[in-house]
Amino acid sequence: MENTLLLNMDDILHFTTISGNIDQYKMNPHIFNAQILYIEPILGSDLYEKIISLVNSNGITATTYSNYNTLLFNYITPSLVFHTLELYIPLNAFQIADGGTFQYSPTNAQPNTLQDIDRITKKYQVIGSKYDDKLTDYLVANKTLFIEYYTNTGLVKKTETTNRSGWYLGTNNTASKIRI
């Protein structure tokens, strides 16, 4: 299976304030994993495979497959950028080599604590989930444009909800809402 990536470092730099000196090859596995873990479940396998096929054939442009172009660049890309960083940040803090696992320590800087890394990762997760909601809302509102979304027969079934908030436990007799 070919690992087609739906975004590159330019997309990541466009949507975030991360440094431009990160090597693309270090980011690529996280892009691919974010596609599989976050984007494919939202789209379903059929729509995901259609977009991959169009990207591989250079078929997505503003004039050809313009609906897919809008979907990819206005909805999938922002979501994918933030989920990629959500995966990249905690793993980038460490280097795995033949001699073991090490934490990088730059000369003129201090590495973040694990709590700081977790906090930053959570921020990217929250932003990514908001873009997931926008993506899902767009797909639902434009159901006639993406037949693969509704006729999904692929291995990964689509999920129309991306709610990652706490549990809603209902209401009590005084109609106050309990939230965790």
Image (cartoon, helix red, strand yellow):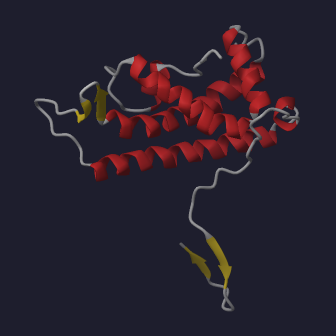
Residue 1: x percent and y percent? 65, 17
Question: At 63% across and 15% down in the image, what residue appears?
Answer: 2
Whether residue 153 is visible to the viewer of this picture, yes or no, is yes
**Farthest bottom residue?**
173
Taking the image as shown, residue 100 lies to the left or right of residue 172, namely left
Residue 31: x percent and y percent? 52, 27
Give the answer, above or below, for where 104 lies relative to 21: below
Write down the quadrant of residue 157 in the picture: top right
Question: At 37% across and 36% down in the image, what residue appears?
Answer: 91
Count of residue discs: 0
Question: At 64% across and 76% down in the image, what residue appears?
Answer: 169
- Observer-nearest residue: 76 or 14? 76
- Observer-nearest residue: 51 or 14? 51
Residue 149: x percent and y percent? 81, 35
Taking the image as shown, residue 113 lies to the left or right of residue 132, namely left
Whether residue 145 is visible to the viewer of this picture, yes or no, is no
Write down the quadrant of residue 128 in the picture: top right
Give the answer, above or below, for where 2 lies relative to 143: above
Taking the image as shown, residue 30 lies to the left or right of residue 46, namely left
**Farthest front residue?**
99
**Farthest top residue?**
57
Question: At 43% across and 24% down in the image, what residue appears?
Answer: 27
